Image (tube, rainbow, N blue to C red):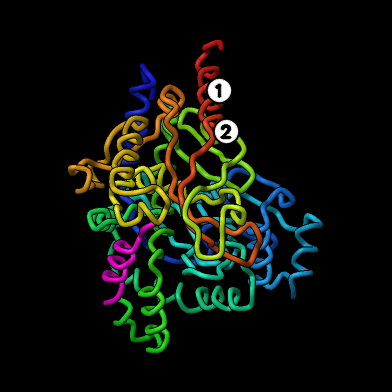
């Protein structure tokens, strides 16, 4: 379809996002839905990157994934595979997936399946491991690997069976609408959404008579303990929404934002699969006791897909309880942030109404033109990883993408349309 103006194309792209019907339908081994994931292949967060350019936490995640899969017996063997180019790397975004922090995903790791029933596409994301020493932050101890195997052997099969007792799966838009009214912004705060998810699946889990009682109890306890469990569902939902919108192939709406510790990358609708990158920033925020900015890793992760669909830092005003945790001050600062985000987005999302913002919808559809024109950068809520693998998360804060990403995207799109610099 031809569009007469960029504005017209942008409206169409955002309508694809808003009109999405994301349903969580299953939890499956990654290789069953991502055929590219075979032996000695790993997915990673962010735009393309070589192993030697990855930060230490992402490299640590690679080691952990290799140990989980049994491709090596110990850390030394895993690093030999990595350093001798025996492992193939693919960005999660290239295979309908997204990954938190390092984003490292291997063939037998379970992923959530979110189906956009309006458009017919699917998106995938690994399961949230909880807090502490976890793979996504670069840890690869025996405890981490044992947990990953439990998630593969117990958590994922139980959730799969529970979801299959529901006719259509879980309507994610409904869960988001409930939780945003309860103080979640779906990047740094997912407490309400995780509890709403547990409320929906608990009856199904308890009714699974073919699953041992002990396993059902373990799953219920894990879900009750994991406040951020819904984040990974929200990420897969964002990917399903934006991938549908990317089919428009016109306009300047941002369809992906992600980071790999080396570069920040964005895509815009009118430039399809092309990445526009610039050196990534380091998050600013609050640190856990004993840590400081000197310990912080540069920004990593695909979780900025949440901001791409208008939540996370874009909807800071929805989550007053999280503002000080991410170092952004108080309610007034949260209000100012969301008001600024409205200046660089196409419209409000009527599906995600924010009571604390006078019942406006979440600001959705970042327009790269407006970012360049105003100099207002998207605000991304994020966890902060230690720059040394094994320490895990050391704080939380906010980060901005470099404006060069948006400038490069607009310049390239202008050239595509035949405009001279």
Quadrant of the drawing holding the C terminus: top right
Give whichever of 117, 77 is nearer the camera.
77
- Which dot marks residue 412? 1
Q: Secondary structure at mark 1?
A: helix
Note whether 78 is above or below 420 in the view shown: below
Quadrant of the drawing holding the N terminus: top left
Note whether 101 is above or below 256 in the view shown: below
Give whichever of 189, 416 is nearer the camera.
189
Q: Residues within 10 Å of mark 2 (few under 14, many from 20)?
A: many
Picture coordinates of residue 113, whole percent (x, y): 43, 59
Please tell me whether residue 189 belongs to the stretch shown in magenta: yes
Give whichever of 399, 129 is nearer the camera.
399
Please tell me whether residue 206 belongs to the stretch shown in magenta: no
Residue at 45% across / 75% down in the picture?
A: 155
Q: Earlier in the sequence, mark 2 or mark 1?
A: 2
Left or right: where 110 falls relative to 322: right
Picture coordinates of residue 28, whole percent (x, y): 48, 66
Q: Secondary structure at mark 2?
A: strand
Q: Which residue is mark 2?
A: 276
Residue at 54% across / 76% down in the picture?
A: 147
Furthest residue in direction bottom, as rendered: 213
Q: Main secondary structure of the magenta part?
A: helix
Calculate the distance from the C-alpha at mark 2 to the C-alpha at mark 1. 9 Å
Q: Residues within 10 Å of mark 1 (few under 14, many from 20)?
A: some
Left or right: where 197 falls relative to 238: left
Tag 2–tag 1 contact (CB < 8 Å):
yes
Residue at 45% across / 32% down in the picture?
A: 269
Which region shows up in magenta?
188-203
Q: In terms of image quadrants, where is residue 362?
A: top left
- Which dot marks residue 66? none
Q: Is residue 316 visible?
A: yes
């Amino acid at each position: 379809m031809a569009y007469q103006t960029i504005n017209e194309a942008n409206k169409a792209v955002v309508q694809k996002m808003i009109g999405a019907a994301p349903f969580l339908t299953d939890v499956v081994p990654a290789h069953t839905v991502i055929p590219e994931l075979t032996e000695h292949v790993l997915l990673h967060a962010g735009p393309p990157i070589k192993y030697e350019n990855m930060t230490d936490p992402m490299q640590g995640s690679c080691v952990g994934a290799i140990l989980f899969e049994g491709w090596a017996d110990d850390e030394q063997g895993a690093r030999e595979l990595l350093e001798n180019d025996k492992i193939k790397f693919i960005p999660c975004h290239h295979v309908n997936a997204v990954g938190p922090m390092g984003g490292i995903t291997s063939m037998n790791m379970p992923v959530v399946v979110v189906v956009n029933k309006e458009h017919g596409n699917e998106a995938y994301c690994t399961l949230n491991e909880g807090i502490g020493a976890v793979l996504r932050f670069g840890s690869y101890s025996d405890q981490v690997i044992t947990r990953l195997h439990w998630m593969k052997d117990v958590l994922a099969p139980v959730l799969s069976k529970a979801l299959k007792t529901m006719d259509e799966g879980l309507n994610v838009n409904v869960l988001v609408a409930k939780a945003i009214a309860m103080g979640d912004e779906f990047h740094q705060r997912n407490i309400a959404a995780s509890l709403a998810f547990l409320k929906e699946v608990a009856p199904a889990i308890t009714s699974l008579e073919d699953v041992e009682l002990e396993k059902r109890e373990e799953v219920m306890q894990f879900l009750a303990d994991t406040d951020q469990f819904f984040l990974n569902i929200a990420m897969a939902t964002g990917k399903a929404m934006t991938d549908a919108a990317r089919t428009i192939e016109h306009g300047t709406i941002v369809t992906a934002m992600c980071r790999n510790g080396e570069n920040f990358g964005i895509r815009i609708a009118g430039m399809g699969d092309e990445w526009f990158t610039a050196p990534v920033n380091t998050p600013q925020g609050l640190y856990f006791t004993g840590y400081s900015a000197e310990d912080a890793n540069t920004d990593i992760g695909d979780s900025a897909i949440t901001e791409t669909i208008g939540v996370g830092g874009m909807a800071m005003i929805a989550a007053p309880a999280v503002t000080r945790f991410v170092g952004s001050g108080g309610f007034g600062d949260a209000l100012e942030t969301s008001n600024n985000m409205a200046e660089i987005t196409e419209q409000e999302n009527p599906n995600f109404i924010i009571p604390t913002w006078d019942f406006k919808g979440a600001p959705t559809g970042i327009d790269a033109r407006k970012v360049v024109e105003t100099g207002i950068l998207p605000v991304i809520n994020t966890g902060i990883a230690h720059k040394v693998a094994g320490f895990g998360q050391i704080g939380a804060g906010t980060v901005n993408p470099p404006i060069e990403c948006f400038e490069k995207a607009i310049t390239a799109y202008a050239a595509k349309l035949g405009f001279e610099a």
